[in-house]
Structure formats: structure tokens, C-alpha cells
Image (cartoon, rainbow, N blue to C red):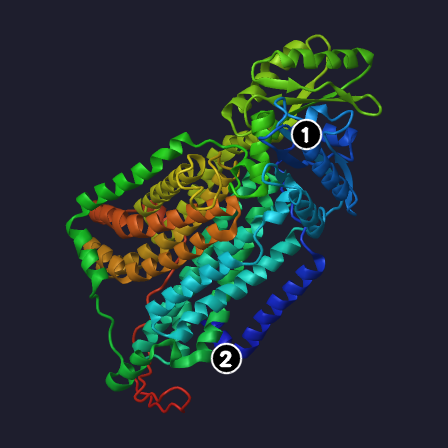
């Protein structure tokens, strides 16, 4: 690492240019190639996946899910004035280039599109098939045309996946706010504008290059559309933090009298190695998703890992080059003036951090009990975690998609927003006859509001029936209906026919996806925890440290999920925060959150315990090791946590429910990890366990390879003491004194 830092310092301009070329090059390539994201939650081999495959094979053109919905309280939708206004609007929409079909309620076959009470009606829209979806300007024109028909007595709203694209917030407001808050915190910590901008610049270059790389990755494999935003969220958080740790060590070296080059080299050789180790643990946790063998998550794992790798690379290459560029401006003016007048000084363990460390040492049992109680209370809502589909019913109440969803549910029943699709492969007239009788059986099934007549493909070898449940797509009753249809109703109805009817649709697909994930979750968590413990075992040569880290990480995950359940599933403040209504948690969220949180929690564990371990090796005094380690690292860990929390919370403003879940969950986990676990519960437990913290069987100690995360700083090397530092812009004259 020393050689790498020295090379980057000597060729600082070349390093900066290479990173800019990488950023601009990937940006140009991504702009030229365009995005190709996929949100296919289907899992090959599940029943819903088989239903979807049969449906697409028999009806390749498919149909869209976009609708225009209108409602009136005075009179009915069949009133002459309402019919005239809406017919005119639908005709204008149908004439727009790119709209292939509009099926309204005012025709011979439109009676089913009018609610039983006559107050609500809808029209189905079909856009021209395009790999990238309909043009957003076209969809916006459709929305404006339909909403233009609204009056004081007539409400008009639109719903569907294409319509939803017009509600996505444009720009990068969340990233900008997160970066600005981080910059303010860094300036408060460093007191130097130049030093505070370096972590920001380093993170932005690394994250920007990774974001463009993620766009290109989408052309090679399935990548979810939230992967770039998730990667940016993680990358900004860890990138700024990693650079913060290195800059802090560099500034410490400058205050101790080292030259700029020597301080940067030593910072990268010590803290830089810890950054590489910490980034490696994050990548190991993220790539743990690959063992699930779900293509939807593979792209997320690789894209997020790519972001972490590039931010780490920027921290140990671009950052030292920038440190060499700004020189002594990494220190504040007051620090430079004090260094010139009084010479180098030794860092003293004073201030709030030292007093807090001593307080924990004196009251470990009491503080440990309080911390454990807080974590337990916050984790309790996790017991009611419900995985399921999050749809447009969870959008903010002011959005047109939410209004359309609510009007359809009120007029036609909640199940109309998530119908189930029954698909069967038919072989011969007997199969078709049995399938055609199936709707009569379904209409008398508990939980079924209606069942459409069977529809056969052109060749007659595939049949489709649409079933509307009595409950919403998010309801657990709808999931129970899916299980009942698959387990008893359909097998009994089609007994002796040999016809295998598959149940698909939105709820069925999400239930199958959630079932597969939950089935593999123990293996996934065990793998991630096991690999993390192995890395810590190698680094700290202790049984107790990895085990405590595993327990602390699980506590952080459980508590953060408790807050997610309370806000998003129970709806505590979700509408107030502009995050829509209450609803189930996305099925993939536990896996991604566990990966990210285990990696981030391991970061703080590494930075905290590595200093304790260094002191333990030097003194063999556990109380001193814990006290000194906490006192010296808590300030920088807390500063890093504030930055990461600010970045994560800023992403709540993205307007995306999934990203908001990640943002709040990660921010909560980092806050609890930094302010409750690492600075309270972990040191309290370590004080109570004493020297047992560092116990390792002799036979195991002989077998394990030697790994050093952050070696102690070299002793007895020449140190540069700046005697006189002139103000910025002037030449600096310094005498070199060997200490």
C-alpha cells in the first residue's frame, strides 16, 4: 500500500486524469447504449412463472395495464354530459401516435367497465410495443388529455405501469442534498474547505463511474431499475466515509510534523489497508446474494459490489493524489498557524470521547443492559413482517395513479386492482370443455368476487380465466386464496381431466418470489455471517470478537427492520413523509438489506476493534485497550455515521418507495450501529468479558494465517517539522529537522 500511495503521489496529475477519463468514458458509453433494466420477479420453476410462460406463448402481443378512470357523485357516468366529455377525450387519446387501442365503456361490449352503482367507469389503453416502453412525452400527453376532461363534478385519473413513469421525480435532488449535508459535516469536522471537499470529490468520481458501469451492465444481465440508485446510495455513504478515515489519519500525520508525502503514504499504508478490508467485507456480504441463484438479485449484487470496489479504489489512489495536490491546506488555517508557531504536537486523549470512554468503563453492566433493551424494543415489529406486493395503492394520495387505484377499488371492489390469471395447457375437446366449466365453480369459491368466461388462444391449446378476488392484492386473504386455489379448488375441479391449471398474476408472482427467498434466507444469512466471522477471526485472532460482531450485526438488522415495518407496513407517518400508504414489504428487501447492513456494520467493527487490538497487543491490558480504542475512534466513527445517515435519509426524497425503504432502513441501522452498538454495547461487553475477548485456542492460532488490517505506525523514522508556513498563495519555506 505504501508503494501504491507513493506512486499516486508522484504521478498525481496522471492519476487524476485517468480517473476523469474513466468517468467520462463510461458516461459516454452509457449515454450511447442507453439503459436496459428489468424488473422481472419471476422465478423459473414456480407456478406463477409457468403461468406467465404459457400466457406469453399463447398471446404474444399481450395487453397493457394502463387505464383511464373517471368517477362522479352527482348522477352516473352514463349521463349525457359525462359520456360526451369522456368520449371526446378518449377519441383524442386514440388518435395520438403511439396509442394502438382504447377500449371504453360506451360500446356494445363495455358494460363490464361500468361499476354496479354507475358512478365509476374506466377505459383500457394499449400503447405501441417498444423495447424501451412508450415515449414519456406521449404518456404525458395522454395524461394531460384525459385530465383535461375533469370538472368539479367529474374526477378523472389514470393508472398503470406506463402512466407511472410520468410520476417519477426527475433530477438528482436526493443525491445533491445528501452530498451537501455531508460537505457541511466534513467542514465542521476538519475546519478546512479543501479537506472537506476531498472525500466528496473522491466518492463522486467513484460512484459516478460505477453508475455508468451499471447502465452498461444492464445490457449483459438482468439488472433491476432501482440498482443504480441503490448503488449510488451505498457508494456515496461508504465512499465519503472511507475517504474521511484516510484524510483524518493524514491530518494527524501533518499535525505530528510529517511532510505531506509522508503523511499521505502513512495514511494509505495504515488506514488505507483497513479501508480495503472493510470494502472487501461489504463486497463479500453483497455477493452473498449470488448463492440464492435468482437472476433478479444477481444484477443488484454485482452492480452494488462494483460501486463499492470503485469507491475503495478511488480512496486509495485518487485521494492520495488529491492530498498531494492540496498540500498543507488539508489542515485548517488555525492548525497551520499553530503548527508553524509551536511545532508538531502529540494527540492527547481528552475531550468528550475520552470522558465517554471512561464512563462506559465504569458502568458496563448498566449501559450494556440499556443498550440491549433499546435494540430489543426496536426489533419487536419485525415479528409481524409481511412480505408482499407493493403497488400503486401505496403511492402518495396526491398522485394520479393512487387516485385511479382507489376509484377502481371503490367502484369495482379491491380485487380488481390485482386479478389472478388462471392458465392451462389444453389437449383436445374434452380438456376445453372442462376448462370452460371452471368459471362456474370459481364464482362459488370463497374469496372470489368474479370469474370471467374462459378465453382460448387462436389454436385452442391454451385457456385463460381472469379471477377477481374480493380482497386487495396486498391482503393476506388474497395470498390465502392463491393457496386455496392451488391446493384444493383447482385439483378437485379438474380431477380426472388431466388438465393442470396454473395460477398467476401479481399477487401469485410476489408470493412465489417471497417463498423462494424465505426458503433460502437461512442459507444466505448463514453464509454471510460465516464469511464475516472468518474474516474477523483472521484479522483479530479471537473467537469472541467475531461472535460478538455476528450478534451485533443481527441486532442492527432486526432493529432497522422493526422501523421499516412500523413506517411502511403499519403506516406510522408514511403519508406524512410523502411515502404513500401502508403496505407489505418488498420480498427482495430482506436479502438486499441483510447484505448491505452486514457489510456496513462490519466497517465500524473493523475500525473500532482494530485500534483496541493494537493497544491489546502493546499492553495486554483489556481495560486500557477498550478505553483507548473507543476514545480514539468514537469521534471519527460518529462523524462518519452522521455523514452516512444524512446521505441515506436524503434518498427518501427520491420519490421511489423501494429506495425510501432502503434509505430509512440503512440510516436507522447505521445510527443504531454507531451510537448504540459500537460506542456503547460492544465496549460494555468487552469490559465485562475482560481478556476472554482475545482468547484463541493455541492449535487454531498455529493453523491460521497472519493477517494485519492496520499495522502500527513505524517508529523512529525521520519526521518533517515545518518551522514556518506562509499564508496560502505564497511560497512555503521549511527547514527539515530529524526527530
How many numbered marks does the figure carry?
A: 2
Q: Can residue 620 be seen here? A: no
| Residue 728 screen position, x and y as percent | 39, 86
Label 2, label 1: how far apart the Cα atoms are: 80 Å
Q: Quadrant of the C terminus?
A: bottom left
Q: Is residue 654 left or right of residue 42?
A: left
Residue denoted by label 1: 79
Query: Quadrant of the rendered structure where residue 565 is?
Result: top left
Which residue lies at the image location 62% right of the left edge and 23% below the top edge? 468
The vertical placement of 19 against 617, above or below, is below
The vertical placement of 253 against 487, above or below, is below
Q: Quadrant of the N terminus?
A: bottom left
614 or 225, nearer to the observer? 225
Q: Element type at marker 1?
A: loop
The vertical placement of 191 against 457, above or below, is below
154 or 365, nearer to the observer? 154
Which residue lies at the image location 58% right of the left edge and 71% below the top edge? 20
Residue denoted by label 2: 10
Circles 2 and 1: CB distance less than 8 Å?
A: no
Q: Element type at marker 2?
A: helix
Q: Can residue 439 be seen here? A: yes
* Mark 1 burial class by Cα count in 10 Å: few <14, some 14-19, many 20+: few
Query: Quadrant of the rendered structure where residue 243 is?
Result: bottom left
Amino acid at each position: 500500500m505504501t508503494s501504491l500511495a507513493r506512486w499516486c503521489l508522484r504521478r498525481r496529475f496522471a492519476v487524476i486524469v485517468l480517473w476523469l477519463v474513466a468517468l467520462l468514458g463510461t458516461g459516454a458509453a452509457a449515454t450511447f447504449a442507453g439503459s436496459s433494466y428489468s424488473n422481472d420477479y419471476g422465478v423459473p420453476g414456480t407456478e406463477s412463472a409457468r403461468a406467465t410462460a404459457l400466457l406469453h406463448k399463447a398471446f404474444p402481443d399481450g395487453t397493457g395495464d394502463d387505464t383511464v378512470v373517471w368517477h362522479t357523485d352527482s348522477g352516473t357516468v352514463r349521463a349525457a354530459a359525462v359520456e360526451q366529455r369522456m368520449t371526446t377525450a378518449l377519441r383524442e387519446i386514440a388518435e395520438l401516435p403511439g396509442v394502438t387501442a382504447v377500449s371504453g365503456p360506451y360500446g356494445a361490449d363495455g358494460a363490464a367497465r361500468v361499476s354496479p352503482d354507475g358512478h365509476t367507469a374506466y377505459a383500457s389503453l394499449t400503447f405501441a410495443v417498444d423495447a424501451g416502453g412508450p415515449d414519456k412525452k406521449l404518456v404525458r400527453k395522454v395524461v394531460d388529455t384525459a385530465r383535461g376532461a375533469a370538472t368539479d363534478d367529474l374526477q378523472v385519473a389514470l393508472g398503470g405501469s406506463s402512466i407511472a413513469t410520468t410520476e417519477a421525480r426527475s433530477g438528482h435532488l436526493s443525491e445533491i442534498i445528501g452530498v451537501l449535508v455531508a460537505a457541511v459535516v466534513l467542514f465542521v469536522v476538519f475546519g478546512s474547505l479543501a479537506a472537506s471537499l476531498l472525500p466528496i470529490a473522491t466518492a463522486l468520481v467513484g460512484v459516478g463511474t460505477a453508475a455508468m458501469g451499471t447502465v452498461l451492465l444492464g445490457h449483459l444481465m438482468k439488472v433491476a431499475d432501482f440498482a443504480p440508485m441503490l448503488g449510488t446510495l451505498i457508494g456515496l455513504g461508504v465512499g465519503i466515509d472511507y475517504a474521511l478515515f484516510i484524510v483524518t489519519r493524514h491530518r494527524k500525520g501533518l499535525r505530528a510534523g510529517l511532510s505531506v508525502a509522508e503523511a499521505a503514504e502513512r495514511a494509505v499504508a495504515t488506514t488505507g489497508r483497513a479501508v480495503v478490508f472493510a470494502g472487501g467485507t461489504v463486497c463479500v456480504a453483497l455477493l452473498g446474494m449470488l448463492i440464492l441463484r435468482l437472476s433478479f438479485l444477481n444484477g443488484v449484487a454485482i452492480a452494488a459490489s462494483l460501486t463499492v470496489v470503485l469507491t475503495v479504489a478511488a480512496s486509495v489512489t485518487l485521494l492520495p493524489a488529491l492530498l498531494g495536490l492540496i498540500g498543507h491546506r488539508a489542515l485548517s488555517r488555525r492548525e497551520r498557524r499553530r503548527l508553524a508557531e509551536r511545532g508538531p504536537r502529540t494527540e492527547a486523549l481528552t475531550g468528550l470521547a475520552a470522558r465517554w470512554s471512561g464512563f462506559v468503563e465504569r458502568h458496563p453492566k448498566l449501559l450494556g443492559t440499556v443498550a440491549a433493551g433499546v435494540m430489543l424494543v426496536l426489533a419487536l415489529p419485525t415479528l409481524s413482517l409481511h412480505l408482499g406486493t407493493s403497488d400503486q395503492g401505496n403511492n402518495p394520495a396526491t398522485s394520479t395513479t393512487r387516485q385511479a387505484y382507489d376509484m377502481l377499488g371503490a367502484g369495482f371492489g379491491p380485487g380488481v386492482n390485482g386479478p389472478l390469471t388462471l392458465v392451462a395447457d389444453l389437449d383436445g375437446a374434452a380438456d376445453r370443455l372442462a376448462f370452460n366449466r371452471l368459471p362456474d365453480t370459481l364464482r362459488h369459491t370463497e374469496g372470489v368476487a368474479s370469474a370471467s368466461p374462459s378465453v382460448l388462444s387462436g389454436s385452442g391449446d391454451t385457456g385463460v380465466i381472469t379471477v377477481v378476488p374480493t380482497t386487495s392484492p396486498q391482503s393476506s386473504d388474497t395470498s390465502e386464496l392463491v393457496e386455496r386455489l392451488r391446493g384444493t379448488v383447482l385439483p378437485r375441479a379438474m380431477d380426472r381431466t388431466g388438465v393442470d391449471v396454473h395460477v398467476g398474476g401479481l399477487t401469485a408472482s410476489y408470493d412465489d418470489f417471497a417463498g423462494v427467498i424465505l426458503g433460502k434466507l437461512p442459507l444466505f444469512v448463514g453464509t454471510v455471517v460465516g464469511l464475516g466471522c472468518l474474516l474477523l477471526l483472521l484479522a483479530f485472532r479471537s473467537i469472541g470478537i467475531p461472535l460478538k460482531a455476528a450478534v451485533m450485526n443481527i441486532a442492527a438488522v432486526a432493529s432497522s427492520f422493526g422501523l421499516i415495518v412500523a413506517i411502511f407496513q403499519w403506516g406510522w407517518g408514511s403519508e406524512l413523509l410523502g411515502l404513500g400508504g401502508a403496505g407489505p414489504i418488498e420480498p427482495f428487501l430482506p436479502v438486499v438489506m441483510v447484505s448491505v447492513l452486514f457489510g456496513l456494520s462490519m466497517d465500524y467493527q473493523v475500525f473500532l476493534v482494530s485500534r483496541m487490538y493494537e493497544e491489546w497487543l502493546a499492553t495486554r491490558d483489556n481495560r486500557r485497550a477498550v478505553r483507548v480504542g473507543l476514545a480514539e475512534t468514537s469521534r471519527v466513527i460518529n462523524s462518519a455515521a452522521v455523514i452516512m445517515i444524512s446521505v441515506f435519509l436524503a434518498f427518501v426524497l427520491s420519490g421511489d418507495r423501494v429506495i425510501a425503504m432502503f434509505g430509512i432502513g440503512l440510516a436507522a441501522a447505521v445510527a443504531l450501529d454507531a451510537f448504540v452498538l459500537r460506542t456503547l454495547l460492544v465496549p460494555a461487553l468487552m469490559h465485562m468479558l475482560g481478556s476472554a475477548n482475545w482468547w484463541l485456542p493455541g492449535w487454531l492460532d498455529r493453523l491460521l494465517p497472519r493477517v494485519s488490517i492496520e499495522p502500527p505506525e513505524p517508529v523512529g523514522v525521520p519526521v518533517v517539522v515545518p518551522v514556518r508556513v506562509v499564508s496560502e498563495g505564497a511560497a512555503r519555506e521549511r527547514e527539515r529537522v530529524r526527530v
